Image (cartoon, helix red, strand yellow):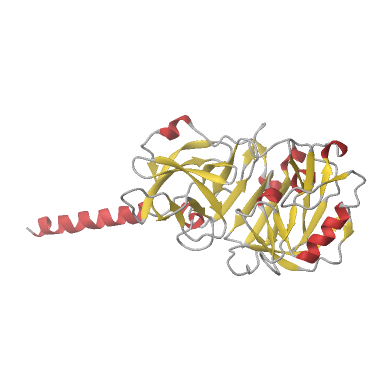
Amino acid sequence: MKMANKFPVALCCMLLCSLAAAATPGSRPLVGELIGTRLSLRIGTPPKTQLLQLDLDARVSSINCGPSPRSSYQVSLNATDGSNPTGPVTIPGVPFKCGSPVAALGRGSQALPARLSPRNKKIVTYCLSQQGSSPIFFGAQDINFMPNKRPISPLLQYTPLVSPPARHSYAIRVNSVRVNGQRLPAVKPAAWALSSTVPYTRLVTPAYVAIRDAFRNLTVPRVAPVAPFDTCFNASGLGSTRVGPPVPPVELQLEGNATWTLFGANTMVFLKDSTVACLAFVDAGSSSPGLSVVGTFQQMHNLVRLDLEKQRFGFTGILFFYQTTCSNFNTTLAAQNSASGLIF
């Protein structure tokens, strides 16, 4: 009789332990598919795909819940070896609230970095592309892109993450800015927030005016500005290179002796059927007084990393220099459409 009484207790303990383990990320890195700045995520049972806007500042993700909302759902992604997806994985108990679809990449225990990264590897790495899909990694250290499985991680430079301004999760310290090798005295050392929802970098007025005036010295015909930009050129007079229009590079001198160099592909945006090219920065003005924010256009074509274990931000610079692009990673797997998957 004593043996019979112990059996339900033992079984109950086993079930509770297995549920606790299932709710915790495992040891394998995951890879997801980005469409622009939106994450394609399979959510629920059976899994349904939703596109969620990346938000570096959000603490909890949100989805279109439907008639029977829950506080958490299972999500499905692919495990990866850093070069390819290796198989579908299901992670139960990921918190969501109801609302416009948002993939929360902010700090905190309910955001995706904490929920999807393997144990002791709270690292999010993403690569934004304007054409085709591109990857986002949770927990991956070593990443290799096509062609020929080129190692990308060694290209990363790092700068410390610093205390972010209010309403933001991540920031880096910009000590100075150079345009075409010339330091701009008007740009003072400050923390710049990182954003995945602001499309074009917003600069405090003195910094914006300094960069704008440096570009207005280009010997290229100016044309009428196209909102929200105020410095635009006849695109036919610019020419092209592997890294975009041959305009002066903008160098962000960062804490820790890192330099993030922005070339034409990240500083000039083409509009009106590519007949007009505008300086892709905007004056923060009253929208965020006293605060500069790095937008998604300036992050395009770069592999960037939020290393929350070591509290640092990594970036490769534009990948075109290395004869690869953000789209050169296969995020999909034929087997991933299966409803069944491996559970951590």
Instruction: For the N terminus, give its image quadrant.
Output: bottom left
| Total number of numbered discs in the rendering | 0
Query: Image point 55% across, 51% down: which residue?
Result: 54
Residue 308: x and y in percent read 57, 60
Q: Name the quadrant containing residue 130.
A: top right
Percent position of residue 76, x then y: 43, 43
Q: Is residue 106 left or right of residue 215?
A: left
State left or right for residue 314 relative to residue 117: right
Q: Nearer the viewer, residue 209 or 324?
A: 209
> Which of these two is toward me, 258 or 273?
273
Q: Residue 261 placed where, x, y %?
A: 78, 51
Residue displayed at 67% across by 43% down: 152
Direction right: furthest residue = 219
Q: Residue at x 48, y 58 (%)?
A: 111
Q: Position of residue 247 (x, y in %)?
A: 85, 45
- Residue drawn at 60 percent across, 57 percent down: 307
Residue 91 at least partly seen:
no
Asked whether, in this view, residue 149 is left or right of residue 89, the answer is right
The outermost residue toward the top is 334
> Vertical placement of 139 versus 171: above or below?
above
Q: In this picture, is 328 found above or below 118? A: above
